[in-house]
Image (cartoon, rainbow, N blue to C red):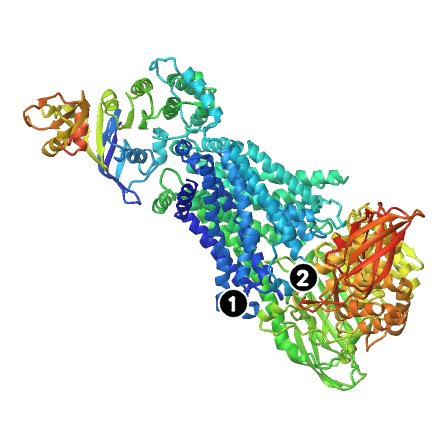
Amino acid sequence: MQLEITDLSKRYPNGTQALQGVSLTIPQGMFGLLGPNGAGKSTLMRTLATLQEADTGSARLDGIDVLQQKDEVRKLLGYLPQEFGLYPKVTAESLLTHFATLKGIENAGERRDVVHALLRQTNLWDHRNKPLGSFSGGMKQRFGIAQALLGNPRLIIVDEPTAGLDPEERVRFHNLLSAIGENIIVILSTHIVSDVSDLCRNMAIIHQGRVHAAGDPTALVDALNGKVWKKAIARAELADYQQRFRVISMRLFAGRTLLHALSDEQPEAGFEPVVPDLEDLYFATIRGFSSGVVN
Amino acid sequence: MLARIFLFDFQQRLRRVSTWVYFLVFFALGYLFTLMSGGAVPGSSVDFGTGGKVLVNSPYALNSIITYICFFGIVITAAIAGQATYQDIDSNSAVFFYTAPITKLDYLGGRYLAAFAVQVPIFASVGLGAWVGTLMPWIDKTRLGPHITAAFFQPYFINVLPNLLFLTAIFFSLAALSRKMLPVYVASVLVLIGYFVVGQTSASSLAVSVRAALADPLGGAAIDRITRYWTPFQRNSQLIPLQGILLANRALWLGVGAIFLAFTYAKFAFAHPAEKAKSRATTDEADEKPIASPAEALPIAHPAFSTGASLRHVASLTAIQFKETTRNVFFLVLMLAGFLFSGLSAAGINNPQANRTWPVTHQMLLMATGGFAIFAFAIIIFYSGELVWRERDAQLNQVMDALPLQRWVLFCSKLFALMLVQVLIVLLIMGAGMTVQIAQGYYHFQIGLYLRDLFLHRLIGLWMICVLAMFVQTIVNNKYLGHFVMVLYIVATIALPPAGFQDYLYRFAETPPVTYSDMNGYGPFLKPMVWFRIYWAIAAVLLAIITNLLWVRGTESSWRVRMLLARERFSRATLAGVTACVVLLLGVGGFIFYNTHILNPYRTTFKNDEARAQYEKMYRQYWPLPQPRITDVSMRIDIYPEKRSVAVSGTMWLENKTSSDIDRVAITIWPQDLTPLPMPQVRVDKLGFVGGQTALIGDAALGFYLFKLPAPLPPHGRIQMEYALEYDNPGFENSQPVGDIVHNGSFLNDRFTPYIGYAQEIELTDDSTRHKHGLEKVRRIPKVDDVAARQYNSVSFDADWINYDAVVSTSPDQIAIAPGYLQKEWVENGRRYFHYKMDAPILNIYSIQSARYAVRRDRWDGVNLEIYYQPGHEFNLDTMMASMKETLAYCTANFSPFQFHQLRIIEFPGYGTFAESFANTVPFSESIGFITKISKKPDAVDLPFYVTAHETGHQWWAHQVISAYVQGATSIDETMAQYTALMVMKHHFGPESMQRFLRFELDQYLRGRAQERNEEFPLYNVDPNQGYIHYNKGAMVMYALQDYIGEDKVNEAIRGFLKEFAFKGPPYPTSLDLEKYFRQVTPPQYQYLFDDMFLNITLYDNRALSADYVQRADGKYDVNLTVEAKKFRADGRGQEHSIAVDDLIDIGVQDADGKYLYLAKQKIDQEQTNVTVTVDKVPARAGIDPVDKLIDRNPDDNVVAVKKQ
């Protein structure tokens, strides 16, 4: 099973080019979609989740034309949007049961088993009789994932699921996702690099509506081996360095600015080589210094 | 800071498209309504406070147009005022404002003022539109008066702006305190329906009481109280003054608004609602313990996606949506309010004239659904928005939309939930109706009728509106704009028919009006109702399919994408559905079109009027042509109730009563309420003279024929005319069906037989209507001193007194009745025949009735009394019988002997609400006397008794003496019938019970003259159309006259008058002849009454200023009273000038029980007079003209409490 996206483009009525010739092949397992805010991740996710139309291009999930056969896609789909609300007065169990019905789980026994199992897995079992209005952000998010997992979905799309979660909740959430994500396609969009490096065997970096890099994160990072250099400088020198070198990232460290730059050889005295990580790749990519597809 | 907040918010709102949409729509409404009332739209007959002599740009008309249109802006006010604070909650930005260094006053004050301020330009656009409308070249210049700038502003200062301040305060407070929009909607719905109910109440009530005028939060009742008696002159020239009751009303409600704001200021807190924080705390705590999440395998479920599953989804989603809609306190409040409103209106609160009817089921349905329709519409409008936006408002739409549900499942579940709400609403009506029935001790429920009417008629209509509302919400894809578009739809349903758009083939979800009658069931109303329901039901299904295609699913809502999606969604099933709907719609529409445009002509009000105008334009020239008169009528009428057809044939003898030869005879055939032919379709099978004729004109469309006789008819020569006509009602019509020939209760009362000559009564009588159709001003009937006109009597120009004979046949189970005495009754060929014959000459008017009657018989002094009635309508038979007897007794004793030995009252279906007197025969509507519930209250008017007495009186007034066809004719025929009824009632109920009746007559007269479209005449030359003069003022005048000169004197004069004129042919008597007899019996000091009451329009402004008393040594009491008397004369337009008072006016002193200790006339010849009278007991109240005998626009201030000195 694999999702084949070909040349997908989308322009909004206000002129924003949200997607521009996006082509991706997404195999089974966790797939990370990495990009800054406004890169077009949500547009892509919503398009795959049948909520939005593309101007051109196609997406096929095995035999299904995702853009045309929406009803077929929805039968396989679990979707967790970036932002969502819940009916505040309804309890977690009854709303989840309601969704289970709507997902076509007709058998009442099956439905109860699934709902109970999901409430347990998402650690909402103790809160199942509480109204959703009293849920914290993390609980709400977990309810969202429970909802997305109903009815054995073959394609799960989760949009920025860890935004607003505390670190512990994030870990739990990752565990849950990776446990179910082995035999089906899970597309996870995020702007947090470690989400992808922790979870995904495949990924794509999307920026300004285009795919700038795609493939196995390890392989992609490997391509940068020996090309990333670091140097600690005074803050005042930063502008000068940015002009002279391909600076991919900088952060404050012990009162000085530690910058990473991309270069095939040592850019200048004082630069030291570093072992590249996904973050280097990500920043190098969105700064336009690097792109590549490795499968 | 307040100013900054105000400015920011105000500017934000001004930048919104919706603000300008509202502005433009209101501008357009003001503009269009002005054009329509200004005669710029051909075929339009809109009157908004205008009409007749009230001009389009008069202060009164502008006030009506502006306040009426602005009234529909309540939904806008609700949206804007609610959003003023709710926008922060909605957008989750409240916390930024709550934590900013601003005060509550800054925040609330700024937001409130901005919400108010932004509405000012929106609502001002109505006046602007109206003003631009008056400048348009195509407006009829005769409908415009001088431009009065202040008249465009005044409605805003006295009405619109105070209302905005008040309503904005209410809605603003509700939203600010509840942090929800729903209470705001609920409040706006309550205001909306409350206003309609109040409007209905005040429109029909005796007088808007001071309390009602104060209680109306929008001020309409107060304005009505001020202007209700304004004459056209005043309406055209006077601004509505902001004083008195109106000022008090405005101050009161602005005060209430201020209290709301103050309360809001006190209660509003810059904080999150407390309860949320609390519950959050507990769950956070519970969430502390870390729980590992072993990745155990999920149980495998087996989703199924069958059609059956989809249907089950619809059912469960519908149930959830329905529950969500109805299970909250707001819905309960709405339902309770609806129950109260419908119950109150069904209980007859809106009809306090003591002539309430028994709560028969069809009356319950009628009253409960009238104003209630607006309530149901409001619920549909608001809840359609809520349902369509429910997921999006909860931000759950993305999750829902990605579920494997068919799109129609989502759409249908919402539509069905809304439709289920309508079931609750009709059940509510049923409950309210039955509650009222039980409360009034009426247990004949007619459940079947309730169910049929509510579920098969009203509910289906409401369901169509549901579909429309869902469609609109989906199309405009903006909740508030959707509400507004639906309000526009309602405005359109009200405004389009008068504008000439009357075809039900394009009036969504509407059917021709349906009147239920106990006698005739749904009768002729059923067929058009059913067919139009089917037609619009198909259209609604089509609309639902389109809505489903355009349903917003997913996150995109641009039209490009929606059209794209719609094309994509257009499946084969959709195609089949659309095709089926279109085919069915065309089929049913074609069938309706065949019935309503081919079998029956489709005519708007304008076209009907145009036909009448055409008749006048083309054939008026034959009015002076000398014509013979009918002397003998012999007719045969075959009624076929089941086919709704009638065949009329017969002969008429005509005599040349002129002094010259007649060679041409004109004949008009124009039956049925002056609506043009053929309604019903009329076929002329035979029309001609025994000796032959040559046709000169044969205009079947306008019903005019002109024949040349083979030889001229010499003076006194007689000729026999023969005719055979057939009336038929094929198919059904596109308007209210004619209820003359029906299955049970046929009633023919107008000219269903040929009319000799040009029929002047076909002419249009309203000047502004005439102007629209290119006719000059109405030709008044001849002046009272026109000697030539006295050759005609006022009921039929083509006859004097005639001999009458009729054979009527009908279905074997029905009784057919015509004037005359039954000679023979037989059955032949399965039909029942009746032969009626008059033994003395009668006027040339007759009625034919046929129904399955029960008969109540009685006798009075050799006279057979009969009441033919619908079984079940026995309520008032005794009263009617008693009234007939007492009236016959009174008239026989005081006027002259009764000319017949039979008198019959015959019920007809409630398609008309009148009774009418023919020779010894009185058709009487089921809805005015038969089901009237006679109040036990001592001061209530017994309507059946009164109407019966009036109609019995007509056996003298008309059927013994008939007036000449000149002005003032009805001051004999109708006013004297009123006098007869008044005297019979006075003797039956006692003089003290007459005051309430007189007060009612006074109010009706004053309202009537305010509505006068042409010119008000004094009583002696009243126009036949001025019922408010010859009935209401006439009753006042005659009551006063007998009070001044004595009842026996009046009757003495009447005896003399009857002796001279009863049963005489031309010249017929005029009002001056009657006045002459009255003057003869009137002492000199009262002769001035005739100038005041008969010959002029005289009004008084009498009032008591103060009164006190002292107890005298002999135990009696001296009452010292200061009264004021002002007297005015008015011209026909209502312009007044004051004249000196020199009158004898009642001075009265009452005790605490209302009994008169003193009541006598005193000479009043100054504006202010001090009077001292001595009474035996402690006086409580005293005043001038306390019994309302004189015409006084403010009778409430005639009496004051007497204080102890």
Q: For residue B860, which quarter of the picture? A: bottom right
Vertical relation: B339 (above or below) B1083? above
SS at badge 2:
helix
In the visual, does B1202 lie left or right of B147? Answer: right
Question: Is residue B699 in view?
Answer: no
- Residue B312 locus on image (x, y percent): 48, 31
Closer to the camera in the image, B1122 or B862:
B1122
| Of the image marks 1 and 2, the number of the one nearer the N terminus | 1
Question: Circles 1 and 2: CB distance less than 8 Å?
Answer: no
Quadrant location of the N terminus of chain B in the rendered image: top left
Amino acid found under the numbered disc labelled 2: Ala
- Residue B864 locus on image (x, y percent): 89, 58
Name the subunit of mark 1.
Answer: B
The residue that disc 1 covers is: B139
SS at badge 1:
loop
Closer to the camera in the image, B487 or B550:
B487
- Residue B779 locus on image (x, y percent): 67, 74
Closer to the camera in the image, B20 or A286:
B20
Vertical relation: B654 (above or below) A179? below
Name the subunit of mark 2.
Answer: B
Vertical relation: B321 (above or below) B683? above
The residue that disc 2 covers is: B1010
- Residue A72 locus on image (x, y percent): 35, 33
> Mark 2 packing: few (<14 Cα in 10 Å), some, or many (20+)?
many
> Mark 1 packing: few (<14 Cα in 10 Å), some, or many (20+)?
many
Q: Give the total number of marks visible in the rendering.
A: 2
